[in-house]
Image: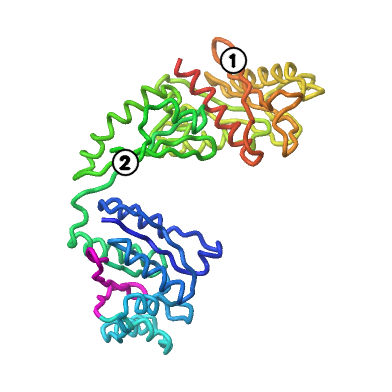
Amino acid sequence: MQAEVISIGDEITSGQLLDTNSQWLSTRLADMGIRVLYHTTVGDDLAAQTGVFRQALKRADVVVATGGLGPTADDLTREALAAATGRPLQMREEALQHIRQLFKRRKRQMPKRNESQAFFPAGSRIIHNPNGTAPGIDIQIERDGGECRFFALPGVPAEMREMWKGSVQDALRQQGAGHRIIVHKKISCFGAGESQIEAMLPDITRRGRVPAVGITASQATISLRITAEGDSEEECLASMEPTIKTINDCLGDLVFGQDEDQLQDALLRLLRRRGQTMATAEWGTAGLVTRWLSMAADADRTGKEHFLGGVVSQGKAMPEGLDLPADVLPKDLSDEKAVDELVRQMATACRRRFSADLGLAIGPFPAIAADTKTIDDKPHTVAAALATPQGVLMQRLPLLIHPALREIFCGKNALNFVRLRLLR
């Protein structure tokens, strides 16, 4: 089966509201083995909605639409569905009584306009809405080469999800969905670009391959998305194993985790495995590394035992609490040698202050014009130092990325700097 998910409303097409319904529904459809091929968003316009519905009925086996079932003049889903299917709207007494009872329980007078919510295209079924005035619509349409099942649900996420679980998923199972499932797995990488990583792999991203592999980039993290279809989750995961092994064999230490893993999660795992502790000192990165590690440690039962905390400065002054002499601050922050020495001392002082096994120091950021990537033909970099029991390791972190992402890119490179050292 192939599906289309339709989101309805000017508030979505105008960008005023984020469409989370489509994401939620697509995940549930995939869990039932139904592949979602289309996401469509349409505003509160009768002709536009009618056209979208007609197109969806032609190209999808299952359509799930959300929104436009309220009582106001801009709620047009019923009229558009009636026009798209050629079936007149009919009053359904059962639905009308439910709406009246709902207003009665709330001790409110039902406006005349709410009666419109009891109209349904001829031949459709009512999807019960236990906590709202907008019942859903379930209609099956015959077409050349088969049929299409169309479900219209309210746009209110809580109501939509309740109605999905209470009615729609069972209707789809009765129609044969759910015997096969679709499983997704994500392999996360850092340290090389999207095209470079794809070039390092055999032809696993080609169209038509089973299991399918897609590649995406987000804030310098590269994700390889593996998709398999089977009769059970175990069957899907087993079919993915050779592909996962190929990715790991080809990419080696570029791979840092799977599924929802972030670099900070991978680093905490390594610290735990080695029984080591770590602290941070940041100057100019908005405290991102400290915040990421703190949040990951909070989510991990033993994380706080391994990340001990950090100090942060976003201004011109050095991070407080490191007890460094004032003359350690270079007069010229473009003097890389002097800045490297400063960051070495920050890392050592950070390790000492927190009594940590490792002290990571980053900064300060160079002054960078928004449209430049180099200083005197040298790429922009930020100094990072890792103080260990054996000494201090230095690395220059690249900033060759869009200005809006420089702090994130620097923070991720700093985490990866430590991760790679711990893998050795």
Q: At label 2, which amino acid type do we have?
A: Gly
Residue 221, x across and y down, in percent? 50, 35
What residue is at 66 percent from the left and 26 percent from the top?
382
**Residue 329 on image: x %, y %:** 77, 22
The residue under the point 70% across, 36% down is 314
Above or below residue 7? Residue 320 is above
Secondary structure at numbered mark 1: strand
Is residue 152 one of those drawn in magenta? no
Circle 1 residues within 10 Å: few <14, some 14–19, many ≥20: some
Quarter of the image containing the N terminus? bottom left
Magenta includes 133?
yes
In the drawing, does residue 385 fall left or right of residue 270? right
Magenta stretch, residue numbers: 123-148
Residue 133 showing in the rendered view: no
Left or right of 346: which side holds 325?
A: right
Q: Looking at the image, can residue 315 be seen? A: yes
In the rendered image, which residue does mark 2 sit on? 208
Comes first in the chain, label 2 or label 1: 2
Q: Residue at x 57, y 27 (%)?
A: 414
Residue 408: image location, x then y, percent = 59, 36
Given contact means CB atoms under 8 Å apart, are the residues at marks 2 and 1 in contact? no
Label 2 element class: loop
Question: Pointer 1: what residue?
Answer: 393
Residue 54 found in image quarter: bottom left
Task: Between residue 160 and residue 225, name the one nearer to us.
Answer: 225
